[in-house]
Image (spheres, coloured by chain):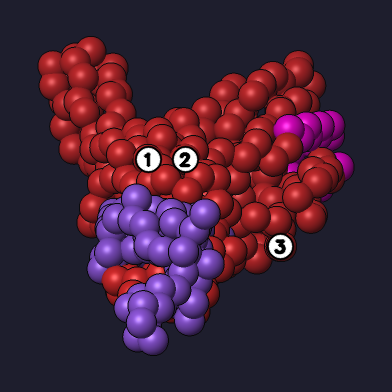
């Protein structure tokens, strides 16, 4: 039987009935005692750091969970074609975020 | 532990979005949004040059063929004979040569020894040139008598391509025009030229024989735009004669 509150000789020695810890606000791998005195196992996934380069027109998913500090960097375009080297009227990007027309 | 609200943002080209430590609900970070990524494909980009377009989110490499420097070799039939050459591209492709002259290049001078060769290089404006064979036309002119006006050969297509012959010995003179060629630049003298090739030529036996051959290629550039080219003149006969000639008109223009 789980015990959430202990009173001895009129004194409250332990009381977790007011605790709000729950599995979904505790990191996975950690545990605590819930308000009902039951052990609560954490379920928040530790995702680590989000250090990623994101290609153009793609999406990087931040899944629910705990993330360490990190960065997501937009892809640096590094094309070297210039307008005069591309068919007339055709559009493209080279090394900036500005579209170029051949 | 810090609880963050859902993140939905975009990382522009080369820029960084910071992810702070803490809890995130399911979120997304978008890569650079290249609106309407572009419609170029590899075959439309000069070989070896890299670019991005809708064809792929990854960097692409162009594959447009290059013809490099245009050269042409001609023979001289007579030792010491002066020759003039006109050189043209003979295949579609990207020419890399720097701009140092007009599309038409001629070389006059002495090529020796007899039967030797000389090489003429022509520098054309960089760009992709595509040969369009516009039309094959035929002209027939039934001569009557020296100096007499003759029937008018008719050239068609490419707008109008007409030929008149006012006198003998005479010239075929033709004009033609074309506008709004879909997919091509506004045509100027800088990015197109016209070449008229002799496909065949024969003359009959009516009257005295005159010139028995045509210069194989008649080349022209326009002084402005692809409006009307005039003075497409080629002597095709002297005195009275009957002849047939077939010409092929090629329009070369840059995309």
**Which label lies toward us, 1 or 3?**
1
Q: Residue at x 75, y 50 (%)?
A: B158
First in sequence, mark 1 or 3: give its number: 1
Q: Residue at x 78, y 32 (%)?
A: B138
Numbered disc 2: what chain? B
Separation of marks 3 and 2 at Cα, in angstroms: 28 Å
- Does B3 sit above or below residue B206? below
Give the quadrant of the N terminus of chain B: bottom left
Residue located beneath label 3 in the image: B179
Instruction: Report if residue B232 lies within the magenta region.
Output: no
First in sequence, mark 3 or 2: give its number: 2
Residue B173 badge = none
Residue located beneath label 2 in the image: B42
Residue B160 position within the rendered picture, expressed as x and y whole percent measured from the top left: 79, 54
Residue under disc 3 on the same chain as residue under disc 2: yes
Q: Residue at x 48, y 81 (%)?
A: A18
Q: Is residue B239 left or right of residue B67?
A: right
Q: Could you say which chain is coloured red in the image?
A: B
């Amino acid at each position: 039987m789980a015990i959430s509150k202990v009173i001895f000789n009129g004194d409250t020695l332990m009381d977790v009935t007011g605790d709000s810890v729950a599995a979904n606000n505790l990191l996975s791998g950690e545990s605590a005692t819930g308000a009902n005195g039951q052990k609560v196992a954490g379920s928040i996934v530790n995702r680590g750091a989000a250090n990623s380069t994101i290609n153009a027109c793609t999406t990087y998913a931040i899944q629910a969970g705990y993330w360490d500090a990190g960065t997501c960097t937009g892809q640096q375009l590094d094309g070297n074609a210039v307008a005069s080297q591309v068919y007339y009227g055709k559009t493209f990007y080279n090394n900036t975020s500005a579209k170029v027309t051949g | 532990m810090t609880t963050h609200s859902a993140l939905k943002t975009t990382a522009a080209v080369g820029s960084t979005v910071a992810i702070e430590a803490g809890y995130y609900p399911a979120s997304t970070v978008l890569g650079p949004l290249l609106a309407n990524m572009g419609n170029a494909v590899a075959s439309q980009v000069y070989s070896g040059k890299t670019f991005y377009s809708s064809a792929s989110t990854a960097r692409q490499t162009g594959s447009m063929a290059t013809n490099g420097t245009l050269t042409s070799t001609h023979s001289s039939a007579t030792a010491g004979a002066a020759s003039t050459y006109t050189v043209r591209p003979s295949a579609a492709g990207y020419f890399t040569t720097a701009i140092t002259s007009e599309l038409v290049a001629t070389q006059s001078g002495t090529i020796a020894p007899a039967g030797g060769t000389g090489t003429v290089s022509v520098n054309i404006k960089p760009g992709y040139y595509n040969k369009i064979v516009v039309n094959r036309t035929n002209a027939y002119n039934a001569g009557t008598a020296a100096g007499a006006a003759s029937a008018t050969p008719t050239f068609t297509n490419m707008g109008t391509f007409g030929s008149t012959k006012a006198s003998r010995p005479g010239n075929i003179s033709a004009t033609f025009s074309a506008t709004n060629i879909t997919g091509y630049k506004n045509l100027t003298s800088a990015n197109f030229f016209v070449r008229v090739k002799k496909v065949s030529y024969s003359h009959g036996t009516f009257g005295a024989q005159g010139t028995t051959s045509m210069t194989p290629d008649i080349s022209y550039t326009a002084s402005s735009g692809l409006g009307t080219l005039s003075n497409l003149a080629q002597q095709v006969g002297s005195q009275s004669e009957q002849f047939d000639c077939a010409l092929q008109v090629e329009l070369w223009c840059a995309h």
